[in-house]
């Protein structure tokens, strides 16, 4: 079996737009790992290749910290593999069931992130879901969907309900399962996931303290949610992303660079 993780560079065999998407997507995988949001080899981040209907997704078997621009797999919305590295690793079916559904239904979405974090799964298992306890979580007031658990996401029929429950939001809590965010860019989807994860961690910590929880007025929550939407003041990711790339470049790692 061929389970090597050093893959030949595809930089010279893809368009410049696809290569840049590959680099940013690989960076996103590394950042999800760096901020403690991984689950072994599971979960996915997908990105649409500009001016195509094709997606990039991770090989099923790599750690997020191992993923590079050249290790990503090109698939269509139905999960058919169009190109991938020379390896016996394939892709996880649930990746294109969930991600393909959202990419296919939302033309404004170019990146989808799904996680199984401890805090995310905890909040996903609470009947009240995410509470507006912090400024970070108030960002999601009126801008967060919920999808009831139907079992492992391998049933194509579930796609309709996933899309319905996400609606026009950029964040979704998969009840008893985990978290999902999406965005017009990889940078924006990462920022939204970072904030959603931080909100869940803060909620679990606050509830674990057994102190009385304080929730601001409805008017304050609505004002805060509006001010923190990506289109109100500035798009998320534009200012943050260069700093995130500098952080990755400064990391000492035994793994190949994300942009290789």
Image (cartoon, rainbow, N blue to C red):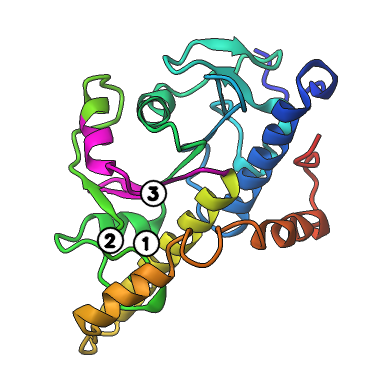
Q: Residue furthest right?
A: 12
Quarter of the rendering occupied by the C terminus:
top right
Q: Are marks 2 and 1 in contact (CB under 8 Å)?
A: yes
Kind of element beneath mark 2: helix
Q: Which residue is mark 3?
A: 170
Q: Is residue 174 magenta?
A: yes
Instruction: Decide: few, some or many residues near mark 1? Use Cα within 10 Å; few <14, some 14-19, many ≥20.
Output: many
Q: Mark 3 and mark 1: span between their CA atoms?
A: 19 Å
Highlighted magenta segment, given as a residue range: 161-185
Q: Which residue is mark 2?
A: 123
Q: Which residue is mark 1?
A: 119
Q: How many marks?
A: 3
Asked whether residue 5 appears in the rendered view, the answer is no
Above or below, comparing residue 15 to residue 125 in the picture: above
User: In the image shown, does 140 or 245 lie closer to the viewer?
Assistant: 140
Image point (38%, 27%), residue name = 94
Q: Position of residue 194 (x, y in %)?
A: 50, 60
Image point (68%, 45%), residue name = 27
Q: As drawn, is 14 to the left or to the right of 99?
A: right
Q: In which quadrant of the rendered view does residue 164 lie?
A: top left
Instruction: Decide: few, some or many residues near mark 3? Use Cα within 10 Å; few <14, some 14-19, many ≥20.
Output: many
Q: Position of residue 147 (x, y in %)?
A: 22, 43
Kind of element beneath mark 3: loop
Above or below, comparing residue 147 to residue 228 in the picture: above
Q: Position of residue 2 (x, y in %)?
A: 68, 15
Q: Which mark is residue 150?
A: none
Q: In which quadrant of the rendered view does residue 128 lie?
A: bottom left
Q: Are marks 3 and 2 in contact (CB under 8 Å)?
A: no
Which tag is nearer the camera, tag 3 or tag 2? 3
Asked whether residue 241 appears in the rendered view, the answer is yes
């Amino acid at each position: 079996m061929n389970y090597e993780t050093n893959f030949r560079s595809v930089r010279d065999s893809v368009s410049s737009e696809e290569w840049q998407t590959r680099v940013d997507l690989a960076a996103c995988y590394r950042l999800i790992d760096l901020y403690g949001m991984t689950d072994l080899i599971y979960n996915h981040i997908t990105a649409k290749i500009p001016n195509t209907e094709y997606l990039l997704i991770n090989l099923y078997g790599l750690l997020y910290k191992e993923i590079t621009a050249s290790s990503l797999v090109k698939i269509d919305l139905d999960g058919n593999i169009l190109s991938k590295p020379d390896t016996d690793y394939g892709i996880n079916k649930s990746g294109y069931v969930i991600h393909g559904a959202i990419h296919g239904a939302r033309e404004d979405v170019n990146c989808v992130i799904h996680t199984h974090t401890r805090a995310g799964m905890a909040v996903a298992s609470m009947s009240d879901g995410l509470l507006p306890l912090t400024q970070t979580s108030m960002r999601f007031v009126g801008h967060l969907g919920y999808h009831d658990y139907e079992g492992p996401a391998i049933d194509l029929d579930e796609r309709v309900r996933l899309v319905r429950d996400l609606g026009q939001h950029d964040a979704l809590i998969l009840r008893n399962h985990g978290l999902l965010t999406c965005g017009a860019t990889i940078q924006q989807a990462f920022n939204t996931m970072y904030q959603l994860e931080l909100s869940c961690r803060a909620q679990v910590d606050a509830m674990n303290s057994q102190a009385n929880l304080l929730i601001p007025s409805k008017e304050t929550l609505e004002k805060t949610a509006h001010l923190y939407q990506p289109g109100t003041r500035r798009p998320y990711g534009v200012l943050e992303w260069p700093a995130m790339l500098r952080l990755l470049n400064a990391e000492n790692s035994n793994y190949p660079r994300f942009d290789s």
